[in-house]
Amino acid sequence: MSARDLLVASPGGHVEELAELMHRLTPAPQQPVWVTARSLQTERLLSGEDVEWIPSVGSRQAWRAARSLPIARRLMQKHRPDRVISTGAALALPYLLAARATGARVHYIESATRLHGPSLTGRVLERVPGVHLHHQAFDEPRGRWRATGSVFDSFAPGPEGAPVSEDALLTIGTERFPFTRALSLVEVTDDLSWTVQTGHTPADDADPRCRRWMSPEDLTDLTTRASLVVTHAGVGSVLLALRAGKHPVVVPRLADLREHADDHQLELARALEHRGLVSVLLPDDDPLPVLARARRRSTVRVRPEPVSLEG
């Protein structure tokens, strides 16, 4: 049987990271089969790819991950992969464990959001012999973890210019924590035409600007047309803006305001600001000058270094 690789990731930012990184991986994936849960995002992102659709597993849903082990074993027996490559998260864990049990080489690439150490999934995999551990952005060396390139190495600050339109997009993702603070930004500007993706945050249903959910096609189209993109510090949302050539304003969810479980969004936002790829907006900042300058800035694609998994 010829070589075959499985690419395993949860929907959302995790699968976006793996999709961005896979073309830089060396050795390149052979006959890749994607393993993820079905969503509007994954259906669009992986259109035309070979995909095994599996049950979804949410963050910290260990019981649901455990119930996926029989499915994972059957999938490994079906494909007999040489390598399994994953960016997490909980959804991926049973498939990585099943892959090790069959003797496949397993590579786990920690999310770019993790700067001070691994996620829970990463900490579990530290205890599994034979798993190759890779990180994108740890600020200090750690055990068996090897540094790889970051998903954000593909982008660099672009030239400044006049805004292309009066359209503006605010997207706050799918997190279940309310994020009312971000929604209030649309009221500080009078000259922009806003579209707002509100997700689980309560909003005025009668407000024509607000849409709870959007299709990937609509979100991509709105991002492309907007002169200003404002987003939470989710990897998938930030990547969407950067791919469209935008310089997004990032409003990180903060733990002390009960907008998230921890402050990893703040850490990621600061790291991206250091690269010149985003502007960060915190609660005490004056938003108007930040929004105005971001409308003039841009992002360009660059050729990054390959991501080596072996050796």
Image (cartoon, rainbow, N blue to C red):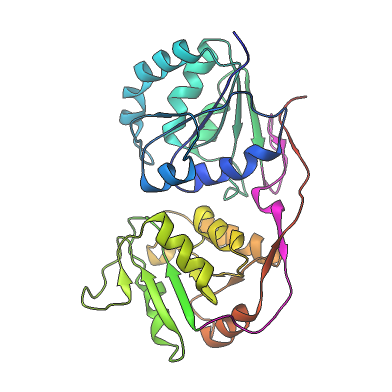
Outermost residue on the front side: it is 48
Q: Is residue 255 visible?
A: no
- Quarter of the figure with residue 84: top right
The percent position of residue 110, horizontal first and vertical second, equals 59, 39
The image shows residue 46, relative to residue 198, as above or below, that is: above
**Spot occupied by residue 123 in the image (x, y as percentages of width and height):** 54, 33
Image coordinates for residue 124, horizontal then vertical, percent: 51, 29
Which quadrant is home to the C terminus? top right
Q: Is 26 situated left or right of 38 in this image?
A: right
Q: Is residue 247 magenta?
A: no
Whether residue 121 is visible here, answered yes or no, is: yes
- Residue 252 location in percent, x, y? 50, 65
Position of 187 relative to 46 (above/below):
below
The one nearer the camera, 230 or 58, is 230
Residue for point 55% across, 60% down: 238
Q: Residue at x 50, y 42 (%)?
A: 15
Q: Which residues are magenta?
A: 136-165
